[in-house]
Image (tube, rainbow, N blue to C red):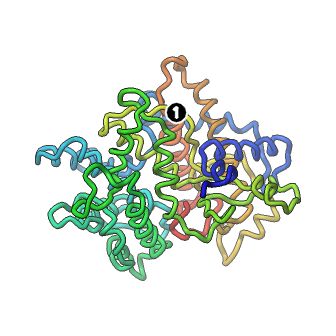
Amino acid sequence: MSMSYNVTYLKSLQAVRERSHRVYELAQRGQLEHFEFDESKIDDVADYVLSLVHRDYASIASVPPHGRWRSYCVKTPEGDRDLVAEHVLKWKASDVSEWECARRVIDLIMVSVLIDAGAGANWHYEDELGVFERTEGLGIAALRMFERGVFSSHPHNPFQADARALLVLSDTDVARGFQVTDSNPLLGCTNRAQLLRNLGRALSDGSRYFGGKCACNNHPARPGFMLDYLSGCTEAPLVVSIDDVWDVVIDGLACVWPAGRTQLDGVALGDVWACDTLDVGSDSERQRADTLVPFHKLSQWLAWSLLEVVVKLGKLKVSGTEKLTGLPEYRNGGLLVDMGVLTLSQADLARGLRDGSNVPVFEGGDAVIVEWRAMTVALLDKIADRIKAKCGLPSDQLPDMFLARVLEGGTWKAGRELAARMRPTTKDPPIDIISDGTLF
């Protein structure tokens, strides 16, 4: 049975941007439910972000795109290292083809992104390269599991992730891989393990995307085989549309996300939530659908991350990348709160302060969080537009994937640095989210 228009729309990138900008338009009229909005401070944010770009890079054109690969570019006493690039060089030296190298990196990136929801302030990962926390720690842990063959069923090749291995991955396997103990707790560890098992099911069921040209009993489905699918979708020589990449992510991985979230017409929508800011008080199914705001944050984080591999190693060009949005997560959103663009209402602040916490805490589906995330998506567009105007580059010299460079250079970094400066003990965002390991 074909999906309804509403379901198809809410799974689209178009809907993420359009619904979030509807909330922004209400904010401009002073009609937010949970935040006060100060539009005059957007320029301050753009200036601060641009100052970090100039501090760390020659210009916005020199900033790499935001993606999971960045977690594998680490500083060591011996100098900067790109752990992914090092593996690719070793594989090529062992006569592994460029195409298979790209598949392997896609395998790594997909499992690494799916376990990349917030780790919490009390978890860390100890590695030979040092001690890593939060997203970097999760990334290094995923890489080490990948190297040990935790995600592979191949007896002689640990460097892959495949359906056969992921389907039987245990909670203990994942907890051991993340070095989880009573004194080193990881938020939502069992849910992360379930996401990876769900990925195994999605791969197994998704032969269209993940079967590959050589998929058979001896070659179980892998994320990396999506490269074979995309190579057959080219709209011009070596050019593939972002819509085809998005189809792989949003449709091919639909069963990965918890089924208990928002549903419409019997279809689980994933990272889609009712927004009371858009509620006009009707109980009709159509009006209820109109209050839903999609974010698809982990899906978009995965799409941004896959683009770099598809382009750099798969040698494909991707058109239409401007359809992807900024990521509505707590670093980008925290920047907006810490710099006064958004101020939480006093009533919600009081409601969110609990158990002696220094910052308000809410569930991921709370109306505060939904409104905050919608405003984050829209404001990231506004900030990127200001940076385009301020960066000094003529329009014909602006780099592709501009928004991804703003995130990396960038808003995500600015949110993290401000959090560390303003809350040095925890480095938490100004509004905290109760993580289940599957959302942020």
Q: Is 2 positioned to the left or the right of 408 in the image?
A: right
Q: Secondary structure at mark 1?
A: loop
Residue under the point 28% across and 45% down? 102
In the current view of this chain or complex, which residue is farthest to the bottom?
A: 182
Find disc 1 in the rendering and name its residue: 320
State the image quarter where residue 227 is shown: top left
Figure quadrant of the C terminus: bottom right
**Above or below, 358 relative to 303:** below
Residue 2, compared with residue 268, is above or below; it is above
The answer to whether residue 393 is left or right of residue 56 is right
Q: Is residue 53 left or right of residue 3?
A: left
Between 361 and 102, the one lying in front of the other is 102
Spot occupied by residue 304 in the image (x, y as percentages of width and height): 46, 44
Which residue occupies the extreme right position in the image? Answer: 281
Vertically, is 426 above or below 393?
A: below
327 vs 284, nearest the viewer: 284
Residue shown at 76% from the left, 39% from the top: 39
The residue located at (18%, 43%) in the rendering is 97
Q: Identify the residue at image location x=44%, y=60%.
A: 114
The answer to whether 313 appears left or right of 137 in the picture is left
Label 1, residues with CA under 10 Å away: few <14, some 14-19, many ≥20: few
* Residue 119 versus residue 87 in the image, above or below: below
